[in-house]
Amino acid sequence: MAEQNNNKGGNGSGLINVLLILAALSLLGIIGLGLGMYSLWASKTQPKEAKVIEQKPEPGKIYDMGTFVVNLADEEVSRYVRAQIQLEYSKVNLELDNEVKERDPQIKDLVNTLLNDRKSAELSTSEGKERFRRELQLKINQILKYGAITNIYLTQFAIQ
């Protein structure tokens, strides 16, 4: 009889244990579902990271130097270059604008001299053209008093 009472008591406590486990699992499921819903809601309501757009400097004033046809320094074959050159500088610097116009003959002489000192092999590569641009920019900026040239464009360029 003692065994029968234990079995009845065991079935009752076993049933309670099963109910407690089911309740705990249900509670964990509800908590997990709640956390999942919250994280989904939070991700939709959080402001998205704004893209940072870098402001690029506005283009400067462009001064057209014209087209140059210059003999190159090649010794074996007579070659020449035809180049149209444009200078870029600050729009707001009116003194520099006037100075560039006044020094036009000096700047053209610099262009002719620098091109005349080059060989066709030097100017036929992009690195050679870039070296020429930077050297010309440096030489022009050395003679200017009221500002500086920010860029030089070779809008037409042909070697023959």
Image (cartoon, rainbow, N blue to C red):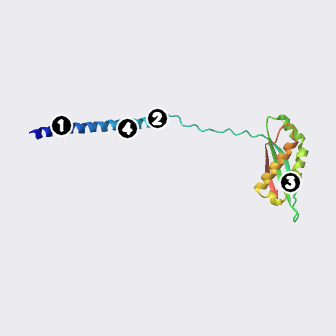
Location of residue 121 (image quadrant)? bottom right
Mark 1 Cα shell of 10 Å, populated few (<14), some (14-19), many (≥20): few
For marks 1 and 4, the one nearer the N-term is 1
The amino acid on which the numbered mark 3 sits, given as a three-letter code, is Leu
Residue that label 2 marks? 42
Q: Which of marks 2 and 1 is nearer the N terminus?
A: 1
Quarter of image, res 32: top left
Circle nearer the viewer, 4 or 3? 4
Disc 4 residue type (three-letter): Gly
Q: Indicate which disc, 2 or 4, sits on the residue closer to the N terminus.
A: 4
User: Is residue 104 found left or right of 92 in the rendered image?
Assistant: right
Residue position for label 4: 32
Q: Distance between the residues labelled 1 and 4?
A: 30 Å
- Kind of residue indicated by mark 2: Ala
Q: CA separation, marks 2 and 1?
A: 44 Å
Q: How far apart are marks 3 and 1 (CA)?
A: 105 Å
For mark 3, what is the residue? 115
The Cα atoms of the two marked residues, 2 and 4, are separated by 15 Å
Query: Do the numbered discs 2 and 1 sit on residues whose CB atoms are within 8 Å?
Result: no
| Residue 93 x %, y % | 82, 35
Q: Residue at x 84, y 48 (%)?
A: 136
Q: Which of marks 3 and 2 is nearer the N terminus?
A: 2
Whether tag 3 and tag 1 are in contact, CB under 8 A, the answer is no
Nearer the observer: mark 3 or 1; the answer is 1
Residue tagged 1:
12
N-terminal of the two: label 3 or label 1?
1
56 sits to left or right of 45: right
